[in-house]
């Protein structure tokens, strides 16, 4: 990922960002940061980039021409296929949040425009800016500090920027909870002792204490966040009544990627924030309105559909005709949910070595890289796109099993969190490699504290049999993926 900061003070920006974690990430080629001096693009022989505003008023205004040319100098050298955004940092923008940082972290390039004086000519903003962002309700002398805040918050979410992969997932604001209090040596300082539970070595008790402290602190300091947390907890308790059927929605909440669109205690509509997929369930389908157009949640989905194509997962078969009539979506696939309900890792039984080193049988398991993308696409017998696999590999969510350097099969974790994309090449079938790959994925998910689950097509008897051999539990009823035909 690359950050391009358009500024009148490039030295200020680079000195602030080329230290600590962001500086190290640049040196290791995990991210790129450049400062583009807007003054270099002025046509004024004296280097002026500002002038008096039309209509009068105090102060000076940055002119459109140098800002536009500076912006074009960056945009014109970026790949056409890349995802880019142009951000103008201004007190008039939408508040910058962790959710916004996660959204921006998906981009290939971010251009951040720093204003000065009384701002920038509105005409150039209308032409190039995609996002107006504010870091708070106060005024700074320029946009450089705000730009540095955005770069720091977004960069740390880019894969491999942080040394500890879990640190970005366990900090303040994750799951609508503030971070729990932390302590270091000495055990007693100014007559204040470290809480005994942290010295016990009992990780289960430590986890319970930390969660309780995070809830308490959030309730006291950020009641707005606590209210969202409490709502999600109520939703999760509702879903747990049918855990196997609703594991996709439960894990969406557990992994802190759920946005509640509708919840009345009996009906729930979630949006998975990463993939954008909607998930719906209803306690009682017998009290549905007689006409689909009277279905309240359906009306909300119609509004969402006007903003673009949507994908909806329904958990009751009776909802299908309502969705078909109201949204013109069709069932693309019906799946049973296969859930690992145990907390201990699945037994290896000599199938592979936990360190992914080569086994006696000559097979080795390792993450896939982009060079293998064509081979993955050509061997997969499903209907996923090349772009989808490219994204999964780029995010480090796919693994392969190899024999003598050649790929024998692969597996991955889908955007919304389920394990899938399992494929064994024909010449390597019958060697328990599918069991090997899924065991790896399940055990790694357990290490992350997740509940591993897969969605298996109802007609795929072989895969259902594999899930049972691995000890996964299968939902009694399927879920239905509904999409535009």
Image (cartoon, grey):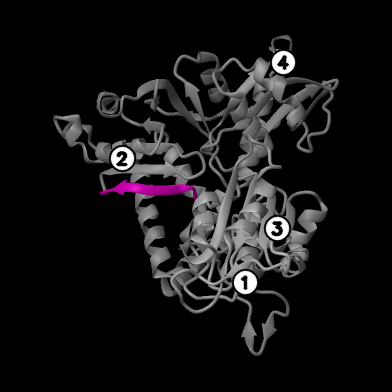
**Lower sequence index among marks 2 and 1:** 1
Magenta-drawn segment = 256-264
Q: Is residue 47 above or below residue 484?
A: below
Query: Which circle, 4 or 3, is nearer the viewer?
Result: 3
Which residue appears farthest toward the front when viewing the image? 45
Query: Which circle, 2 or 4, is nearer the viewer?
Result: 2
Q: Is residue 384 above or below residue 448?
A: above
**Lower sequence index among marks 4 and 3:** 3
Residue 222 in the image, given as x and y percentages of width and height: 43, 70
| C-alpha span from label 2 to label 1 | 44 Å
Which quadrant holds residue 377?
A: top right
Residue 41, numbered circle: 3
Residue 431, numbered circle: 4
**Lower sequence index among marks 2 and 4:** 2
Compare residues 309 and 479 and report the one nearer the observer.
309
Query: Which circle, 1 or 4, is nearer the viewer?
Result: 1
**Residue highlighted by disc 1:** 182
């Amino acid at each position: 990922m690359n950050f391009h900061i358009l500024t009148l003070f490039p030295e200020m920006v680079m000195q602030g960002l080329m230290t600590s974690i962001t500086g190290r990430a640049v040196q290791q080629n995990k991210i790129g940061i450049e400062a583009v001096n807007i003054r270099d693009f002025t046509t004024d022989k004296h280097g002026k980039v500002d002038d008096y505003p039309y209509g009068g008023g105090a102060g000076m205004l940055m002119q459109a021409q140098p800002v536009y040319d500076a912006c074009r100098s960056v945009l014109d050298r970026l790949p056409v296929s890349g995802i880019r955004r142009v951000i103008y940092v201004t007190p008039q923008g939408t508040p910058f949040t962790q959710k916004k940082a996660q959204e921006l972290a998906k981009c290939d390039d971010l251009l951040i425009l720093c204003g000065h004086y009384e701002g920038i000519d509105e005409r150039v903003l209308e032409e190039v800016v995609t996002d107006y962002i504010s870091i708070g309700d106060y005024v700074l002398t320029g946009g450089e500090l705000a730009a540095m805040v955005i770069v720091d918050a977004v960069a740390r979410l880019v894969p491999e920027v942080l040394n500890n992969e879990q640190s970005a997932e366990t900090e303040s604001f994750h799951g609508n909870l503030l971070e729990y209090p932390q302590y270091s040596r000495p055990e007693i300082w100014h007559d204040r002792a470290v809480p005994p539970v942290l010295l016990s070595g009992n990780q289960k008790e430590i986890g319970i204490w930390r969660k309780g402290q995070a809830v308490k602190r959030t309730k006291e300091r950020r009641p707005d966040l606590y209210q969202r947390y409490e709502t999600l907890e109520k939703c999760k308790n509702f879903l747990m009544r049918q855990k196997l059927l609703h594991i996709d929605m439960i894990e969406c909440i557990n992994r802190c990627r759920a946005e509640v669109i509708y919840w009345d205690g009996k009906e729930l509509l979630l949006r998975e924030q990463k993939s954008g997929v909607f998930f719906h369930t209803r306690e009682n389908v017998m009290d549905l309105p007689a006409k689909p157009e009277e279905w309240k949640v359906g009306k909300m989905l119609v509004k969402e559909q006007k903003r673009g194509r949507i994908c909806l997962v329904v958990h009751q078969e009776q909802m299908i005709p309502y969705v078909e009539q109201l949204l013109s979506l069709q069932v693309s696939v019906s799946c049973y949910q296969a859930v690992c309900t145990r907390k201990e890792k699945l037994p290896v039984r000599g199938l592979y070595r936990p360190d992914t080193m080569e086994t006696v049988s000559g097979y080795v398991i390792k993450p896939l890289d982009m060079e293998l993308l064509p081979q993955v696409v050509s061997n997969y017998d499903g209907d996923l796109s090349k772009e989808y696999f490219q994204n999964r590999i780029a995010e480090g969510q796919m693994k392969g099993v190899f024999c003598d350097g050649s790929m024998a099969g692969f597996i991955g974790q889908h955007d919304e969190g389920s394990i899938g994309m399992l494929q064994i090449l024909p010449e390597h079938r019958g060697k328990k490699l599918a069991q090997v790959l899924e065991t790896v994925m399940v055990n790694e998910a357990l290490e992350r504290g997740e509940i591993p689950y897969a969605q298996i097509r109802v007609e795929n008897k072989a895969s259902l049999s594999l899930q049972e051999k691995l000890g996964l539990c299968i939902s009694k009823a399927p879920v239905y993926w509904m999409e535009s035909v």
